Amino acid sequence: MAAKQLVNRADFKSILPFLPPLKLQSSSNTLVWPNNKVIEILQSLSKGPSQSRVDSGERFFETVSELRDSLALSYRNRLARHTGEGFARFFDECLSSEEKDKWFKDIVPVMAKVLLKFPYIVQTHYKNSHSVFPGVADTALRLLESQQSGVVFLARDLIAALLACSFFCLFPSANRRAKDLQGINFDTLFTSIYEKNEEYQKHKIKFIMHYFERICSKRPDGYVSFERKALSPCPTSQLWANSAFPLCRFEVRSSGSIEDHSGGSLEVDFADRYLGGRVMTYGCVQEEIRFLINPELIVGMLFLPSMSDNEAIEMVGAERFSKYTGYKTKLQYSGDYVDRREVDSVGRRMSRVIAIDALPKAGTRQYRLEFLLREANKAFCGFLDQDKSQQQMLPHDVGVITGNWGCGVFGGDPEVKTVLQWLAVSQASRPFISYYTFGLEKLQNLDQVCEWILSQKWSVGDLWKRLVEYSSKRANKETKRGFFHYLIPTSEQSTSKYCK
C-alpha cells in the first residue's frame, strides 16, 4: 500500500492519534517504528534474558520506560503513579519462581517479536480491509464515535499485537479523554498491586498473562468484529403499547453462568457506558470478568467511546481462554479453558457478546416512564439486528442469554428489569430469552411467574401497559408491592404457585 494512500484514508487518520507512535517511511512506502532505538530495545527483548537482562519486574519496567521514552510518550502521557513499584511487586513477589522464569524466558521474547512486527501488522490490516469481506463496507480499524453506527473487523493477530502494546503501556493517553475514551494501558492495574496489594487484582493480571502464554504458543487466526449500534428513532411509549408482537419463550436457569451457555446466542454484557467498565482498574464484576476470560474484548476500548442512551455494542468472535472462580474481591484465575465453539463463515468464533449499560443509581427514578423507555430501548437496540451487511454472516434465529442486568451496584429492580429485557427480546423477534437468576431471592419463582404471564396470551404491548401502570403507582408511592405481586390476581397468589 502506498504511503500517500494510507495517509489519506479517513479510517486510518481517525485512529492514528490513539495508536502507539508510528511513521510512514517514504523510501519503502511502509509503516515503521519511528526510530532505531525502539527496534533495538525490542530486538534485545526478543532474544531473552541472556541478551536483554530483563528477568525481574524492576528490569521489565525499566525497559517499558525506555520504550516509552523512545516513543516520546513520557511527558504528556504519563503513567499512573507507582506503576514501576507495581511491576516490581507483582513479578518479583506475587509469582512463583517457575512462573516468573517462564514469563521472562518464554513469553516476553515472543511479545517483543510481535511488537517488532506491529507496524507491518497494522499496514497489512488496512491493505486487506476492503478485500476480506466483499460487500461489507468500512471494516477497517477506526474511531467509531457516538451515533456513528458501523462495524470493525480485526484479525486476531492484530488484536494480540494491540494487547501487547497495552501491556507495555505504549498507547498515548493524553488525548483519550477528549474523545470520551478511557485508558487502555495496564499502568493503573499494576499501580493497584502496589497501592492495595489485593489478591483479586493480582489474579486479574494472571488472566492476561495466560492469554499471552496461549497466543505465544500458537498464533491466533480468524477475526473478531466490534459493531456500534445506534437506535434512531427510538420507539415511544405509544409504540411499545401498540406492539402486537407475541412474547417469546422464557427459560429460567437457577444455576450456571451466561458465558457457559452454548455458542451462537446473544450473551448480555452488563456493561458500563464505558466499554469494559473498570477492567483496567479496580472493577471486578460481571463485565470485567467477561473481559478477563475473553481478553480480546479489551481491544474494543481502544476505539469505542462511551455509549449514549440509544446505543449498544455487539462483539462477535472473541475466544475464551481462562476458567475462574469467585466474584468481586473473591475472583481467582483457575486455569486454562479450551473454547470449543464453532467458527462462522468469516472466521469468528460463535461468541456474540452484547454490551448494554443499565441506568446507574436507579433508585425510585427507574419507575418513571422516561427511564422505563430508556431501559427498554437500550436493550432493544442491543438485541435487534441492524447492520444488513452483517445479516448475511450471522444466524437470526438465536435467542438472548442474560440475567440480572443492572440489579447489582446500579440498583435496578430485578422484577422490572427482567420484564423489560423480555419485552425487548420479544420485540426484536428473538425466539427465546434464557435467564440466569444467579440465586437472587426475589426471582426464586420467576419460572412460575413467566408461565402465568404466557398463559394470558399477552402481546408485548399488553405487558408493557401493565408495567407502565405499575411503575407509575410505584413512582407515586401508591404501592410498595413488587411487580409480580401487583400483576398476578390475589386469588391466584393465594395458591402460592406464582408469588411467595
Image: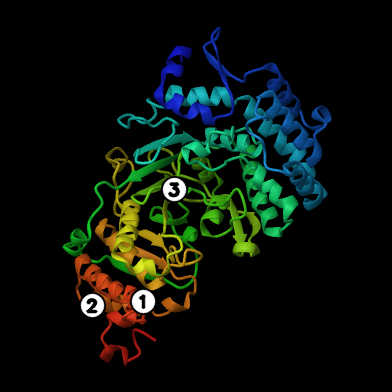
Horizontal relation, residue 343 to residue 70: left or right: left
Horizontal relation, residue 380 to residue 220: left or right: left
Q: Which residue is mark 1?
A: 447
At label 2, counting other C-alpha atoms closer than 10 Å, the crowd grade (few under 14, some 14-19, many 20 or more) is few
Query: Which numbered disc, 1 or 3, marks the residue that appears first in the sequence?
Result: 3
Q: Which residue is mark 2?
A: 455
* Colour scheme in use: rainbow
Query: Which numbered disc, 3 or 2, marks the residue that appears first in the sequence?
Result: 3
Query: Given contact means CB atoms under 8 Å apart, are the residues at marks 1 and 3 in contact?
Result: no
Q: CA distance from mark 1 to mark 3?
A: 30 Å
Q: Give the secondary structure at mark 1.
A: helix
Instruction: State the mark number for residue 14.
Output: none
**Residue 398 place in picture, x, y as percent:** 33, 55
Name the residue: 46% across, 61% down: 258
Query: Which numbered disc, 2 or 1, marks the residue that appears first in the sequence?
Result: 1
Q: Confirm whether residue 460 shows in the render.
A: yes
Q: CA distance from mark 3 to mark 2?
A: 36 Å
Horizontal relation, residue 207 to residue 285: left or right: right
| Quadrant containing the C terminus in the rendered view | bottom left
- Camera-nearest residue between 24 and 235: 235
At label 3, counting other C-alpha atoms closer than 10 Å, the crowd grade (few under 14, some 14-19, many 20 or more) is some
Q: Amino acid at mark 3?
A: Glu
Q: Confirm whether residue 222 shows in the render.
A: no
- Looking at the image, the residue that sits furthest to the front is 476
Name the residue: 45% across, 51% down: 273
Q: CA distance from mark 2 to mark 1?
A: 12 Å
Q: Give the secondary structure at mark 3.
A: loop
Q: Residue 19 is drawn in which quadrant?
A: top right
- Camera-nearest residue between 246 and 321: 246
